[in-house]
Amino acid sequence: MKSSFDDMLEDDFREPYTAWKTVPGPESNAAMLTALHPTIEGAIKTHVGQSNPLLYSRGRKLALSGLKTYDPKRGRLQSHMYNYLTGLKRVNQQQTTILKVPQRVALDKYNLDAMEHELANELGREPTDDEIANRTGFSSKRLARSRTYLPTMAEGTADRLLDGNTPQSSAVQRHPSVWPEIVYDELDPYHRKIMELAFGLNGRTVLQNQVIAEKMKRSPGAISQAKARIQALLDQEYDLSPFQG
């Protein structure tokens, strides 16, 4: 049985669209985007050609915006999406334009900030760097140079950033091996995020407990406990405490 607002809505979209229209939020957004995945990929192929993580992510964002202007009584959802996603041509042109070094890094930073915001809305929490990398396709080095970019930086500074010579926290510099990466991979998203913020991973600024607690919406005591657990894992391999001092 059709609902009151799906006169021309395709059957494949009926259930997720009804849920999205009735109870909008991260869960219904995710379900709707899952249903729209083939449509988004098809629109990218039609309007642009080759897809990439940033272009696909921008397509998802445009698709959610396009849903707000869709009227089931006036046409099919897939046709509406294809027309709405013509905006990807402009997005692709921006991405492929030959830019000077600082402008390329600035574009990376802009896209990184947008992806972090998008993921936070979808997950209902701050995303980890691992989740951000999966969405954007950025390497750890690219994440770091994007975060350390300053609009007023000199050309030579930008060149060094592109070479991967980004400043890191003293704790990261002191650690002599890849053991922190192994520990990070074993953590759940909550503890990964705390390690990123407290350890200054991937170009982040090292934050104090109180600041991390505010960002994570937890108590300072809970942050201390989480850091203690991370430290215990680190100490299994090295007698080093990056969270002290």
Image: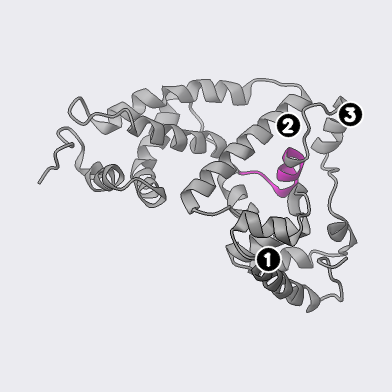
Residue type (three-letter) at the residue carrying disc 3: Gly
Q: Are circles 2 and 1 on residues that touch, CB within 8 Å?
A: no
The secondary structure making up most of the magenta span is: helix
Which of the labelled discs sits on residue 220, or is there none?
Answer: 1
Indicate left or right for 220 with 58 as reference.
right
- Of callouts 1 and 3, the N-terminal one: 3
For label 2, the residue is: 105
**Circle 2: residue type:** Val
Please, is residue 50 above or below residue 118 in the view?
above
Q: Circle 1: is it few (<14), some (14-19), or many (20+) Cα within 10 Å? A: some
Residue at 21%, 38% in the rendered image: 10
Q: Position of residue 187 (x, y in %)?
A: 63, 68
Query: Which quarter of the figure is the C terminus placed in?
Result: bottom right
Image coordinates for residue 89, horizontal then vertical, percent: 49, 21
Mark before the other along the chain sequence, 2 or 3: 2
Mark 2 and mark 3: span between their CA atoms?
A: 13 Å
The magenta stretch spans which residues? 137-146
